[in-house]
Amino acid sequence: MNKPIILGLNAGGHDTAAAVMIGPELVAAMEEERFTLIKHTTSFPSNAIAACLKAAGISMEKVDAVAIGFDPNAFIRETYLQSALESDERLEFLVRDLDSIRHIHNLANKVRQETGFQKEPLKIRHHLCHLASTYFPSGFDHALIASYDGIAENETGMLAVGHDGQIERFYCETRYPDSLGLFYSAITFYLGWKHHCDEGIIMGLAPFGDPNARVPEQDRTYIDIFREIIPITGDYSYSINRKWIAYHQVRDTWVSRHFLDAFGPKRDYKDPLTRHHKNIAAALQTRLEEVVLHQLTIARKRFGLKKLCLAGGVALNCSMNGKIEKSRLFDELFVQPASGDQGVAVGACLLAYQKMTGIAPLRKNHDFYKGSGFTTEETEEVLQRAGVPYVRPSDLYAETARQLADGRIVGWFQGRAEFGPRALGNRSILCRPFPGSMRDTLNMRVKFREEFRPFAPAVLAERAQQFFQIMQESPHMLIACDVVPEKKSEIAAVVHVDGTCRVQTVRPENNPRFRRLLEAFDAVTGCPVILNTSFNVKGQPIVDSPKQALDCFLGTNIDYLVLGDFVVDKAKL
């Protein structure tokens, strides 16, 4: 069976998703949240499955295997049953979670009920799927591979080496509740935001704080305490000091009384954001980077591998990735754009293919535009039904570039949707990167985000080093880097308070339409950089369909909407 058809799933947790491979080719990958409109949804990915099958042009009857990026029985055994024997608190935790345990135990039956696929699904360990999702599409024959997230079956991270298409794990002993991802979520919750949702906000807040400041009424600094909370205990091991946390014992509490005694009461979202809160965020981010860089430095010396692949939800932390890139530990870094749990649907597909064929699907694939796509006729029908005036410009790129140059905010909807949380030029809101006030204009008129959060730039790849101090390309907007000092004023709207930005480099082969727009904007302004943010408003998933894009345009102060080849100008409504 050289071209098996495989359906991969992330189900049973958050960020549920589906993916389809036909032979070694990934043909579709979609997140359920794009259809339910609930960010990070835990719903079974029925809509994503149907949409992936449609995009692949197949029915469920044609599917040869279903692979789940999670082993439910291992999770129940390792996270609940074994730990319940160790303490009364964990036994009580198990009893309180019985409904959840039943739901997880029934996952394979749920797959059969929802899909009609009656064979036994393949159940593949979660972190192994994370590793596969980044190693195989990297195109690297030999690489170090690392995965960090909250919790899987029981592991909270995994380190491996990739050699000629084979993944060999060498460390997977960091186990719940020792988790960089969960502790980051705990501090996200403590600072007043949503856990498993708003961790990126804390990353953006961190540069405003000072980890070396002294904690009020204590003789220690913030980073001193965070080093006590997360001690490094071996070459690859760390722990989370139990006296500071509560998430392993009580739901929705996250931090312990000891933590509250040291740092004060939990912040409510509406409370003022103080220097104290910013210092906590800074210490958290600093300690995360210290622990990960320690592990990677040891592994680099041991194995001598010059390339690194990252995945897992923590790999969405572009500031951490930027520190890794800046360290020059590795010649090249690949971060899979759907590094969160949605990405295990792809990893499960890849590992199932290898298991079924004996062939490693190791092939460079940086095209993660695998979501929903719409024909010109379907797009125009949405506009006609809405009754809005629209035109089809003879030179779409030049006209849109002029609108951007004039300071207008553009909704840009093209091709197939991106897979993962970053908008990479197909479901984007765009504006010029200057002056600095453009950032505030975009935020107040459209995005409605916290004012301290940065926006990201997209740049013509060959011009990137004129503006950004980065040694490699960054097509997935997952590596933060310093902005060249003398260029900061030219692109002030995308420069964060610490002088960094999360850059996307664009080549014609990666996204030809977005590339042509960047070229047109450069021709009009002399600037090869555009501010690129996701096509959504705060709290909503990225738009998926032309109708969602039109609704977002009409419900916000976006000035100009480009839907495929068509344009709607709000000034003419």
Image (cartoon, rainbow, N blue to C red):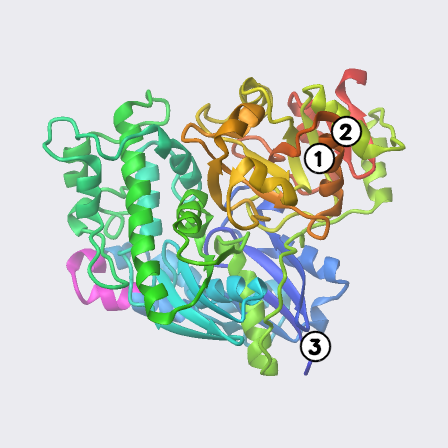
Give the position of the N terminus as an image quadrant: bottom right
**Residue bearing the label numbered 2:** 400
Which of the 4 quarters of the picture holds residue 19?
A: bottom right
Measured Cα–Cα span from mark 1 to mark 3 = 36 Å
Q: Is residue 176 in the magenta section?
A: no
> Which residues are the magenta region?
79-91
Q: Residue at x 61, y 44 (%)?
A: 505
How far from the left and from the top, in percent, is residue 450? 45, 26
Residue 3 tag number = 3
What amino acid type is highlighted by mark number 2? Thr
**Residue bearing the label numbered 1:** 412
Crowdedness near tag 3: few (<14), some (14–19) or many (≥20) residues, C-alpha within 10 Å:
some
Of the residues under marks 2 and 1, which one precedes in the sequence? 2
Residue at the far right in the pictured view = 394
Which of the 4 quarters of the picture holds residue 66?
A: bottom right
Crowdedness near tag 2: few (<14), some (14–19) or many (≥20) residues, C-alpha within 10 Å:
many
Given this view, does label 2 or label 1 mark the residue nearer the observer? 2
